[in-house]
Image (tube, coloured by chain):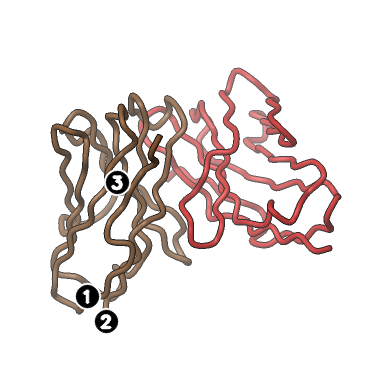
Chain colours: A red, B brown
C-alpha cells in the first residue's frame, strides 16, 4: 500500500542553526503534500504545502523541497528557534485521502 | 475566529463500553475529517464528512462510525471499546473538503483511555 514516512524519529539542532527534516513517499501519483507541526498537547498545525507541479516553495523561515524523481520531500527551517521544538509530520495525497508520516521530533538546544 | 473545538478533551472508559466524541468545525467549514493518533501508528485517517455525507473512509472496523449535522458539527462513535482504541482522536476541518484541496485545521483532540 501507499506510505509516507520520515527518515529520522528525532532530530537535535542547536538554536540558530538550520534544520532539515526529510520525508519519503511511495505513491508516485501523490500530487499534494503538506507539512504539519504538532506541539505537545496540541493538534497538528499547518506549516506549508506544495503541489507536484512545483519543486520548491518558501514561507516564513521555512522552505519545502520536492523531488518527484526519488519521491522525497524535505522541510528546511532557517535559524531554528526554541519555539520550533515539536513533532513534524509530512502528509501526501493522491486527491482522495491524506496519508501522514510517523513524524520527526525536532529538539532545539541552546 | 474560533478554531476547531473538540469535546471532551479527556475521557476514560472501560472495555466493552462505547464513546461519542464531538467536533465543532471552524465557522464556514463544511468538511470534517477524523484521525486517530497513537505513538506506534502515527496519524491514521478514520473518515471525512462533507455536507452531512461520508465522503471518504479509512481502514477501521465498523465499530468506528461518525456523522455530520446540518450545521457541520460532527460526532464520531466507537462501540465495544478495546484496549487498543486508546488514542488521541483528532478532528480537522477545511473549507471545501477533499483531502488534497487545502490545509486542514485541527482541533486539540480528545484523548481516550480504555482500561
- Disc 1 secondary structure class: strand
Residue A13 in the image: state x and y as whole percent: 80, 58
In this rendered view, identify the residue nearer to me: B9 or B93. B9
- Disc 2 secondary structure class: loop
Q: First in sequence: mark 2 or mark 3?
A: 3
Q: Which residue is mark 2?
A: B115
Q: Which residue is mark 3?
A: B58
Residue B70 in the image: state x and y as whole percent: 14, 32
Residue A11 in the image: state x and y as whole percent: 73, 59
Assess whether mark 1 and mark 3 are in contact (beta carbons under 8 angstroms).
Answer: no
Residue name at image x 23 percent, y 36 percent: B49
Q: Locate the C terminus of chain A and report the quarter of the image it occupies.
A: bottom right
Q: First in sequence: mark 3 or mark 1?
A: 1
- Disc 3 secondary structure class: loop
- Total marks shown come to 3
Q: CA distance from mark 2 to mark 1?
A: 6 Å
Picture quadrant where residue B108 is located: bottom left
Image mark 2: chain: B
In this rendered view, identify the residue nearer to me: B6 or A27. B6
Extreme residue toward the front, this view: B1
Query: Is B45 displayed left or right of A49 in the figure?
Result: left
Picture quadrant where residue B61 is located: bottom left
Residue A64 in the image: state x and y as whole percent: 68, 33
Image mark 3: chain: B
Q: CA distance from mark 2 to mark 3?
A: 25 Å
Assess whether mark 1 and mark 2 are in contact (beta carbons under 8 angstroms).
Answer: yes
In this rendered view, identify the residue nearer to me: A15 or B77. A15
How packed is label 3: few (under 14 Cα within 10 Å), some, or many (20 or more)?
A: few
Q: Which residue is mark 1?
A: B13
Amino acid at each position: 500500500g501507499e506510505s509516507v514516512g520520515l527518515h529520522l524519529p528525532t532530530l537535535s539542532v542547536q538554536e540558530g542553526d538550520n534544520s532539515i527534516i526529510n520525508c519519503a513517499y511511495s505513491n508516485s501519483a501523490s500530487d499534494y503534500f503538506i507539512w504539519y507541526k504538532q506541539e505537545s498537547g496540541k493538534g497538528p498545525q499547518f506549516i506549508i504545502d506544495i503541489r507536484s507541479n512545483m519543486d520548491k516553495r518558501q514561507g516564513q523561515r521555512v522552505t519545502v523541497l520536492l523531488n518527484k524523481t526519488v519521491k522525497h520531500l524535505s522541510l528546511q527551517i532557517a535559524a531554528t528557534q526554541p519555539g520550533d521544538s515539536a513533532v513534524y509530520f509530512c502528509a501526501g495525497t493522491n486527491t482522495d485521502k491524506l496519508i501522514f508520516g510517523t513524524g520527526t521530533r525536532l529538539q532545539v538546544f541552546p | 475566529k474560533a478554531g476547531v473545538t473538540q469535546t471532551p478533551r479527556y475521557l476514560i472508559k472501560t472495555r466493552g463500553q462505547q464513546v461519542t466524541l464531538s467536533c465543532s468545525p471552524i465557522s464556514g467549514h463544511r468538511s470534517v475529517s477524523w484521525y486517530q493518533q497513537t505513538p506506534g501508528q502515527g496519524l491514521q485517517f478514520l473518515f471525512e464528512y462533507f455536507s452531512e455525507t461520508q465522503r471518504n473512509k479509512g481502514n477501521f472496523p465498523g465499530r468506528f462510525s461518525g456523522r455530520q449535522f446540518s450545521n457541520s458539527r460532527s460526532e464520531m462513535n466507537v462501540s465495544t471499546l478495546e484496549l487498543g482504541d486508546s488514542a488521541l482522536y483528532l478532528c480537522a476541518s477545511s473549507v471545501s473538503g477533499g483531502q488534497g484541496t487545502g490545509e486542514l485545521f485541527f482541533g486539540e483532540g480528545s484523548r481516550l483511555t480504555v482500561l
